[in-house]
Amino acid sequence: MTHHKAKINQLATGVPGLDAILGGGLPEFSFNFIAGAPGCGKTTLAHQIMFALATEEHPALYFTVLGEPSLKMFRYQQQFDFFDSAKVGSAVHFISLTDDMVDGDLNKVLERIVAEVQAREPALVCIDSFRSLGMSSQGDTHSNRKLQQFMQDLSVLMTGWQATTFLIGDYAPGGDQNPVLTVADGLIRLHQNVHGNSVVRKMEVTKMRGLSTVPGIHTFRISDAGISVFAPPQVDASTDSKSTSPTAIRVGLGVPGLDEMMGGGLPKGYSLLVAGPSGSGKSILAAAFLAEGARCGETGVIAAFEQRSMQSRGPVLADLIRSDCVGVVNTRAPGLSVDEVAGLLLTEIGRLKATRVVIDSLSGFELLLAPTFRDDFRESMARMVSVLASSGVTVLMTSELEDRYIDLRFSPYGTAFLTDAIIAQRYVEIDSRLERVMAVVKVRGSAHSSQLHRFHINNDGIQIGPMMAGHEGLLSGQPTQVDATHRAAKEEDGPSNAQPM
C-alpha cells in the first residue's frame, strides 16, 4: 500500500524577510501564536499578514478583546502602507468580543466566535489580545483547566473550518510550557530592547510544525511600510566566484600604478581591505574603485558609514550616484545590525546588477551598530563577506587604523582574515614632514609587489610615486614599514604571497 505525504500549502505573509525565516511561508490552516511584550509590534505583524492574505472570497476576521480599543487600534494601523481601507468591511472584518467576555464565560466567547466564523467562512482568524481571555476567567477555581479546554476546542474548530489562525498575547519569554502555547502549531516571539536612543526589535520563530525554519533570533524594523525582517543572508553553495584561477580575470582599482603592485589588478570576486589612519586616502581609493568600474560599464553599490555627505567624496562619485550607476545603502537608521545591512546591500546589488561593492568603513559600521550586535560583529561580518563573495561581486572595505609599528594590525576587530587582499596605507616622517606610503600586504593565491611606495593626493586623486629607499622607512629606530607590515600580515593571515616587482 502506497502512502502519500500530505502537502502543506504555504502562504506568502506579505512581510519582507519573514517567509524566508519560516522556511518558505506560513503553513495554511495552522494555529499560531504571536507572543511578546507590549509595544513590540505584535498587532502590526498580525495586521500586515492579514491585509496581505485577505480577499473577498477568502476574508479575514480580526477579533478584539479587552486590550487596545478597536477604534484606537484601527486609527493607528491606518498609518502603515499595507493598510488597505478598501478591504475593511469586505475582505477584512473587525469584531469586538468585549461584551461576550465581561463575565468571564469562555463558552460564551467561543459561541460568538463560532457564529461569526460560520456566517463569514473566513480563511484567516486573529484574536487580539488572547491573554485577556485567560485573565477574564481567573476568578474561576477551574480557570486553567477551562482555558486549556477552550484552546483545544478552538484549535479543533479552526482546523475543521480550514482557517489559518493567529492568537496575539503578551506572554513573557520562558513561558513556552504554558498550556495555552503548547497547543499552537507555530509560535513567533517578538522582543524589544532599548539601547540608548535606539530601539532594537528581534523576532524568533520558536516552532512551526511541518517546516524547517531558520533558527536563531532575527532583527526586524518597523517603518511606514510596516515590518521588515532581516534574516541572516545565506551563501549560495551553487555559486563559486573563485572557482577560476585568481589570475584569470582581474578588475582595475582606478589608481595608476596600483594594479601593477597588485600583480595585475584585484582578482574578480575577491574582497579587499584598505587599512590606514585617518586622512591617508582610504575613501578616495574606494571612490576610484567605483569610478573605474563605471568607466568599464560596471555598476556599483556603496554603504558609507562615515559621517559625511556623498558630495564631500568628490564630484565624480556624486555624479555616478545621481546617474544611478552607483547605488547607496541607507546607513543612517539607528540600531543597525550586520544582517540588515547585508540584506540592503543584496537588494541594491540585485536592482542595479552591481558587480562592485564598497563598505566605508568597518570602523564607522561598528560604531553605528546597536550595542547588542557588537559582540558578534566579527561572526556577522564573516557571514556577510561570504554571502557577497558567493554573489560574484568584488568588495572593497576600509578600516581605520592607528600607526603603531610594534603592534600592527589591519583591523581592530580581527576581521582581516576574512579578506582576500590587503592594502596598507601609512604615514612616515621624512625630512620633518609626514609622507603617505602604501604597500600591498597580500593577494591570496597570487604574486604581488612587496615594495613600499610613497603616494600623494591631488585633484586627480591618488598618485603613486616610486619605491621608497631603504633608509626612508626608518622612524626613530623603529622597524621599517616593509618589515613591520609583512610581519603583521604573516601573524594575522599566514604566509604572504608577496613577490618583488
Image (cartoon, grey):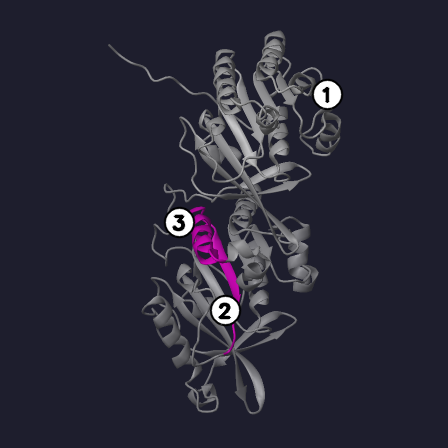
Between the C-alphas of marks 3 and 1, the distance is 48 Å
Give the residues in magenta: 375-403
Q: Is residue 483 magenta?
A: no
Q: Are marks 2 and 1 in contact (CB under 8 Å)?
A: no
Q: Which residue is mark 2?
A: 275
Q: Residue at coordinates 58% horizontally, 31% vertically from top-left?
A: 169
Residue type, mark 2 in image: Ala
User: Residue 383 location, x and y as percent?
Assistant: 43, 51
User: Residue 6 location, x and y as percent?
Assistant: 37, 17
Mark 1 crowd level (few <14, some 14–19, many ≥20, 10 Å Cα): few
Q: Which residue is mark 3?
A: 241
Q: Is residue 335 visible?
A: yes
In this view, 408 is above or below 321: below
Q: Which residue is mark 1?
A: 86
Could you say which is closer to the camera, residue 205 or residue 438?
A: 205
In this view, 284 is above or below 236: below
